Amino acid sequence: MTDTLRASTSALNSQHSRRLVVAYQYGSLALVAIGLGWAVVFASIGWWPVVAMDILLIAIGLLSYLLIRRGRLNIGLLISQTALILLAGTIGLLLDVPNAEAPRVSHLYLLVIAVLGYLNYRRQPSRAQFALIVIGLLSFIALASSPLPTPMAMPVPDSVRVIGSWVNTIIAVLMLCACVYAMQAEFSRMGELSRDLMAALWNDEFQLVYQPQVNRDRTTIGAEALLRWNSPQRGMVSPADFIPEAERSGLMVRIGGWVLEKGCRTLAEWNRHPDFSHLTLSVNVSARQLLHKDFEPLVRKVLASTGADPRRLILELTESVLMTEMELVVGKLEALHGLGITVSLDDFGTGYSSLAYLRRLPIQQLKIDRGFVQDAVKSARSASLAENVIRIGRDLGQHVLAEGVETEQQHALLASAGCVQFQGYLYGKPVTLAEFERRMEDKTQSHASTALRTAG
């Protein structure tokens, strides 16, 4: 996984995804409008505690809108949901106290918040989002089932609450309907995306691009094959958009098999070319793909049918594989390494890695996560951490490759720390196979011309 893939994470290329983001933005502005409306009403009757809460609602809506506009959709939703749960709970306990004249209605917004949270959880699962959904639903149940009297309550006048109950109920129901519509649209998008991914396999719409990997002297020693989808209907689709859906729908095993076969055919062709025969090729493998019962037989079959040299093939695994059955993973990796294949642990240091895992897993290469690379030049502490990661890899007998290198300063720092392999925009962006090979030939000719001039 390179910096190219991560840089595309915030780019929502599908039309439906853009619509969902726009819907979240309008939802944030709706909070601002609701807060402004009620602030005017309660300011006119001098009920300032409620005005203060309405101002807080306006601030939440504006903050959420600005974060989403800046591409921070997930954090914007989490912050707004947390604040809205607290606000709805406070209003329900202190201001919207039920009586014979008017029922409590503020808790209805908690259902809206929970549904929005579920939509966000479907988009990007996280423990924080799951916890907010549970808290929102439990708060709704508590407020709906009991008056929950408190001595600090300051009930809004009944004359206002009677009208407010109708208005808030209508608004909450309309918002809930909008959430249900958005949920249905998102489910339809996922189903349509799965069908399009299957069609993409049949119609050969996927392609590989190649990003160079270099040694300390910046000589190209290999490349990483990166998947791209050029859809006739959607255009160029970001891997961040279609790979999660391919994983969810179970298509990643088949797509990964296509990538493996395509990469091995490229390796076999390189082996017949004197300028390319020394190159390695890295191919990404998902945890689900690795654990599939047919993965090892598939690798053997592809190597045999393409004639690729397994010693030139590198299979990159993310740290998510460490969350599965360790004994099963170790057995599969040992079998792959027994074929001569190099096994690489990608994104090292992002979450699950530990010395215990590294000691047990038959891994021959560590790829330092780009976060370490970016931070290494920002502080002495981060630089020391990067040096220690490199030292750990070397002490364990593993090759260490730093990815996401973008500046000369980063290269110099990592090289001085003992890193000998690099990847990133500094050495080249992902390009088509033809372009990658053309650049390799140009470099070979340039070096040959330089050698002739030196000899002369």
Image (cartoon, rainbow, N blue to C red):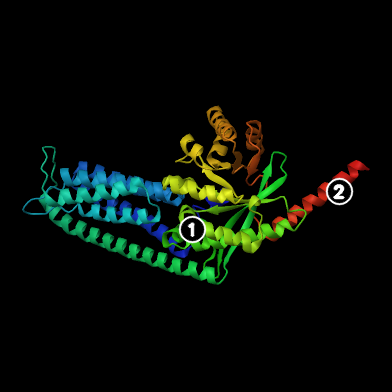
Q: Which mark is residue 449?
A: 2
x and y, in percent, of residue 134 in the image: 26, 49
* Mark 1 Cα shell of 10 Å, populated few (<14), some (14-19), many (≥20): some
Q: Quadrant of the C terminus?
A: top right
Q: Closer to the camera, 129 or 45?
A: 129
Q: Closer to the camera, 367 or 71?
A: 367
x and y, in percent, of residue 115 in the image: 29, 56
Q: Closer to the camera, 343 or 251?
A: 343
Q: Is residue 349 above or below residue 57?
A: above
Q: Residue furthest right?
A: 456
Q: Is residue 99 found left or right of 330 in the rendered image?
A: left
Type of amino acid under label 1: Ile
Type of amino acid under label 2: Ser
Q: Is residue 410 above or below residue 211?
A: above
The picture quadrant where one finds residue 23 is bottom left
* Sooner in the amino-acid sequence: mark 1 or mark 2: 1
Q: Which residue is mark 1?
A: 243
Q: Residue at x 57, y 47 (%)?
A: 343
The picture quadrant where one finds residue 82 is top left
Q: Residue furthest left?
A: 100
Q: Is residue 188 above or below residue 395?
A: below
Can residue 255 be seen here? The reply is yes
The picture quadrant where one finds residue 119 is bottom left
x and y, in percent, of residue 77 in the image: 36, 49
Whole-angstrom CA distance, mark 1 to mark 2, is 44 Å
Number of numbered tags placed on the structure image = 2
Q: Judging from the image, what secondary structure is the residue with disc 1 in?
A: helix
Q: Judging from the image, what secondary structure is the residue with disc 2 in?
A: helix
Q: Which mark is residue 446?
A: none
Q: Residue at x 55, y 49 (%)?
A: 316
